[in-house]
Image (spheres, grey):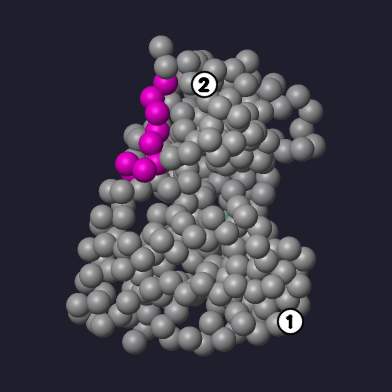
Amino acid sequence: MSGKRLDGRVIAEEIRRSLAVEVNYLKVNFGIIPGLAVVLVGDNPASLSYVDAKTKACKKLGIKSLQLNFDEDISTASLIDEIEHLNKNRDIHGILVQLPLPDQQEDEVINRILPSKDVDGLHSMNLGKLMRGEEGFLPCTPYGILKILSNSNIEVSGKHAVVVGRSSLVGRPIANLLSQKMGIGNATVTLCHTGTTDIGRFTRQADILIVATGQPESITCDMVKEGAVVIDVGVNRISDSSRERGWRLVGDVDYNSVRNKVDAITPVPNGVGPMTITMLLSNVVRAAKNNVAVC
Ligand code: GUN
């Protein structure tokens, strides 16, 4: 028997439909069109395709998007100047700097975005609020994972959640959120990382397993517990000569073998990916709505 496929596109579509209503409401009643600035430095192909997908999703929803591309050797100071301009631009409600940056100081750049425009939820202020359980912008992938769990009626409270990967984009925030008493959470959380010896010893104990390592298909069937729920954040290109384009996308989990053992699992593609973009759109709409409140 194979586990339920947690299709992120279906959940994302439902959320996007209600966001479209909000976008229209802002336009009709306040003449406000939510605006997102996406900053891309260099020409990393994966980043380019993520940024394209974000821009397209904005357009489809009626969000204005402004894409700013900079050479990979732009200085940190110049990049910060650009951020300051965007901070002052009243038509821009949200700013996203696509990561990783080639060589610039990521934390310095991110921390110059106004926290009220930090729709990526990565500014120290928003991450601090997340830690304290205060309302702020949540990073989009962890936020998307919470939505997948709640929309799929997956019980989290009292469960053992094991997170593999300690990035500040995904692993650390989701581990923190799932451990909190409020909202979706109240789980017992284990965070595994590159310093963990014998990761399988921990992943085999997971009722909910969240994997964000960037290591293609590295979580195998023998590493998961029967009946677990698996959320695969990885998006990896591997070569595949049977495809005309010569590659295919796989997650960090070996989907085909793991699926037969678990209760539910997100596919790659079409699992977490569409949810990340959707929660970005949701944060942009919220930032625009906050703007109405302070007018
Ligand atoms: N690179 C990969 N995922 C993300 C994300 O969610 N936000 C940003 N800014 N960069 C990323």
First in sequence: mark 1 vs mark 2: 1
Percent of width and height locating residue 180: 52, 46
* Crowd tier of the residue under label 1, counting other residues whose Cα lies within 10 Å: few below 14, some 14–19, many 20 or above: few
- From the image, tell me which residue sits under label 2: 256
* Crowd tier of the residue under label 2, counting other residues whose Cα lies within 10 Å: few below 14, some 14–19, many 20 or above: few
The answer for how far apart the CA atoms under marks 1 and 2 are is 47 Å
The part of the image, by quadrant, that contains residue 98 is bottom right
Q: In this rendering, does residue 161 appear at all?
A: no
- From the image, tell me which residue sits under label 1: 77
Q: Is residue 246 magenta?
A: no
| Tag nearer the camera, 1 or 2 | 2
What's under tag 2, amino acid-wise? Asn
Give residue 8's mark.
Answer: none
Q: Nearer the viewer, residue 175 or 242?
A: 242
What's under tag 1, amino acid-wise? Ala
Percent of width and height locating residue 110: 64, 70
Is 135 on the left-hand or right-hand side of 39? left
Residue at x-position 38% and y-position 73%: 64
Q: Which region shows up in magenta? A: 3-11
Percent of width and height locating residue 102: 73, 63
Residue at x-position 40% and y-position 54%: 278
Q: Quadrant of the C terminus?
A: bottom left
Is 152 on the left-hand or right-hand side of 188? left
The part of the image, by quadrant, that contains residue 121 is bottom right
Residue at x-position 68% and y-position 22%: 200
Q: Nearer the viewer, residue 175 or 5?
A: 5
Q: In this rendering, does residue 84 appear at all?
A: yes
Q: In the structure shown, which secondary structural element does the residue marked by tag 1 occupy?
A: helix
Q: In the structure shown, which secondary structural element does the residue marked by tag 2 occupy?
A: helix
Q: Quadrant of the N terminus?
A: top left
Asked if the residue at tag 2 contacts the one at tag 1, i.e. Cβ–Cβ closer than 8 Å, the answer is no
